[in-house]
Image (spheres, rainbow, N blue to C red):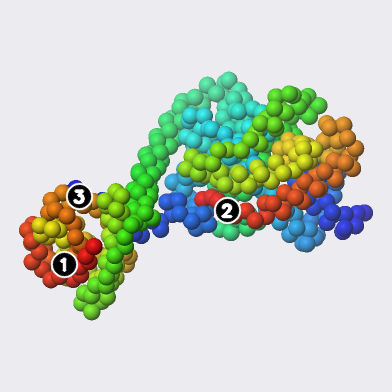
Amino acid sequence: MKSHEWFVEHGVDYATGTLDADDMATFEAHLIQCEECRRETSRIEAELAWLPMGLAPATPRPGLRRRIIQHVLEGKSRRLQRWMAPAALAASLFLAVGAWYAGNARARGLEDQLAGQQARMAAVQDTLSIMRQAGRVLQTSVEVGGQRGGLVIFADEVSHRWNVVIHGLPPAPPGGRYQFWFICADGMVRGAEVEVDPGRPMMFTTEMPETGGEVMGAALTMEPVVDTAGPPRGKKLAHLML
Amino acid sequence: MKKPRLESAALAAQPGTGLVGLAREASLRHRLIARDEQALVELVDLATPWLLSVAQAMLQDRDEAEEVVMETFRTVWQNVTPTGEGHTGLMPYLLRVARHRAIDRLRGRRRHDRKLTAAAFEWSQNSFAAVEPDEAGHPGWQVHSQVHAALEALPSEQQAAVRLAYFEGLTHSEIAAQLGIPLGTVKTRLRLAFTRLRTALAGLKEWVL
């Protein structure tokens, strides 16, 4: 009969699986009745769980990702296939090919989805990169219909792009729409039409206009829906000068 | 004028866009529980290089290592819980499952036929090499660097004992026989090594996901 101290002393050995078989069995029997040791061995396992990360990562062979996903989702097992009796293999060949095709198509679909997500992620990262290296940040408050929001511009002076954030505004009233403008040396140049979602801030990335001369600032107006060209005619809501 | 690329600010806070580690981990776990296959794909991409590394180093068989990795993902897919096994992160959970699967296979082999060949020792020497810092290429390299540094800081005789115990799945007696040293010496070396490693690794935060 081992004392409790023995189990405390050998907690690391148990958690790392280095106890000999007899001691391992003894330890497991003890754990059933000792919560303190259960907690301690769990803690040790958690602390050492990162240890395998000390090994250099391996480069997966082409196709492994697809096989993993197939294996998880379709329940396929290469090990089973490897040892399956030839007769059973022949009998199931047709089904296996069908399952492989279906799984393959599914995996391809997932890869396509991932590619789309990665493209969106790259776009977000690109957008955020402007914020990180913004040489200038401009902001002003905007009030529409008694509701107060804001207009913020992160100006990246290296890539000459802006991230524009508009927040806290109500949806445009019937017949109206929010319009973003560049205030240029030669006049106002129309920027993006802004669709406001009251539930979350609206952000867009914009390059500098190709016409109008030097950009001196920006403005936000409420334009009639029918006006999609020409100078501003609606109510000015806010402006910012560089 | 070019049309502006529109992005909602809310998108940046959506799961899977690689922001805060803990937040993404929680999001991935939630989505895995909800059987979101996209979350599985993300997890596979993030974790496979590390799981494959462990399994390959332990088993010295690329095909078998890949099978272990596949089994690991299936296990996690089928058993992931809201709080995590033992309240640990997804990555520690994956690593633990992979290591246990590999040890099961190692112990399944007839031990007296298994020889620790020169090649087996070669991996143990080489695989502790640090990865060049490349955050984009290898998510998790910071953790790797810390763990690697902790392993490297051990005296060589303790490193050897840890390799045999943790990555080869050998017991105290087997290590003593392998190294030709007394059983008590093996226990002492391992105890000292794991105590130092626990201290060094206790502060690690979850990088995944």
Kind of residue at badge 2: Glu
Mark number, residue A221: 1
Residue of label 2: B206
Q: Chain of mark 1?
A: A
State how many labels appear: 3
Badge 3 sits on which subunit?
B
**Dot 2 and dot 3 within a common chain:** yes
The answer to whether residue B201 is visible is: yes
At 56% from the left and 44% from the top, the residue drawn is B141
Residue A222, quarter of the rendered image: bottom left
Label 3 belongs to which residue?
B3
Q: Secondary structure at mark 2?
A: loop
**Residue drawn at x 83%, y 31% as measured from the top left:** B178
Task: Name which residue lies at 8% across and 66% down.
Answer: A233
Q: Position of residue A234 (x, y in %)?
A: 10, 68
Is label 1 or label 2 in front? 1
How far across and down, in percent of the image, does residue B16 sit?
A: 44, 51
Whether labels 1 and 2 belong to a single chain: the reply is no
Front residue of A70 and A174: A174
Task: For marks 1 and 2, give the CA distance.
Answer: 46 Å
Q: Nearer the viewer, residue B147 or A44?
A: B147
- Secondary structure at numbered mark 3: loop
The amino acid type, in three-letter code, at marker 1 is: Thr
